[in-house]
Image (cartoon, rainbow, N blue to C red):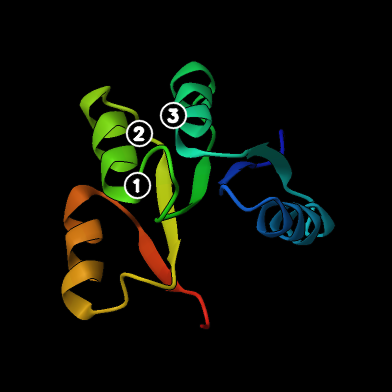
Amino acid sequence: MKPVQILVVDDEKNVVELMRHILKEANFDVICAYGGTEGIRYTIDNHPDLVISDVMMPDVDGIEFLTKLKEKNIRTRFIFMTAVYTSLRDTVRFIKLGACDVIHKPR
């Protein structure tokens, strides 16, 4: 059985590398993208099993990221990480758009 492929998307290299290390230690196949545009392109071309993405990135924010991929009928599952959108209303908005969960980063 092939390992679960997870795409980690964040514009902060240290966050991507930390997530990559942790997920590889848990035996996941990890791919990294250093921004929303790169993450969208990879997801459309390769359909990873799961995308873990930051919400606030300079090129594409989480809402635009998720909306563009849902418009392409991508069935990948999405988890978003945020230190900014921390209200229940924001979390519900992401869930309604199709995210599996929103993880709140410590500030």
Q: Earlier in the sequence, mark 2 or mark 3?
A: 3
Residue in the foreground of this view, choosing between 88 and 5? 88
Q: Name the mark nearer the viewer: 2 or 3.
A: 3
Classify 10 Å Cα crowding around label 2: few (below 14), some (14-19), many (20 and above).
some
According to the picture, the residue beneath numbered tag 3 turns out to be 40
In the picture, the quarter occupied by the N terminus is top right
SS at circle 2: loop
Q: To which residue does mark 2 refer?
A: 75
Estimate the spatial distance between the alpha carbons at disc 1 and disc 2, rounded to whole Å. Answer: 19 Å
Query: CA gap, disc 2 to disc 3?
Result: 13 Å
Amino acid type, residue under disc 1 in the picture: Asp
Q: Position of residue 56 (x, y in %)?
A: 41, 55
**Which type of secondary structure does the marked residue at label 1 adopt?**
loop
Mark 3 vs mark 1, CA separation in Å: 11 Å
Looking at the picture, how far across and down is residue 28, in whole percent? 73, 48
The spot of residue 74 in percent (x, y) is 34, 28
* Residue 74 vertical position relative to residue 30 in the rendered view, above or below: above
- Please rate how many residues cluster around mark 1, counting C-alpha atoms within 10 Å: few if below 14, some from 14 to 19, many from 20: some
Hey, which residue is sitting farthest front in the picture? Answer: 58
For disc 1, the marked residue is 61
Query: Hey, which residue is sitting farthest bottom in the picture?
Result: 107
Q: Residue at x 41, y 49 (%)?
A: 78
Q: Earlier in the sequence, mark 3 or mark 1?
A: 3
Q: Quadrant of residue 87?
A: bottom left
Residue drawn 54% across the image and 21% down it? 46
Look at label 2 and name its amino acid. Answer: Arg
Q: Nearer the viewer, mark 3 or mark 1?
A: 1
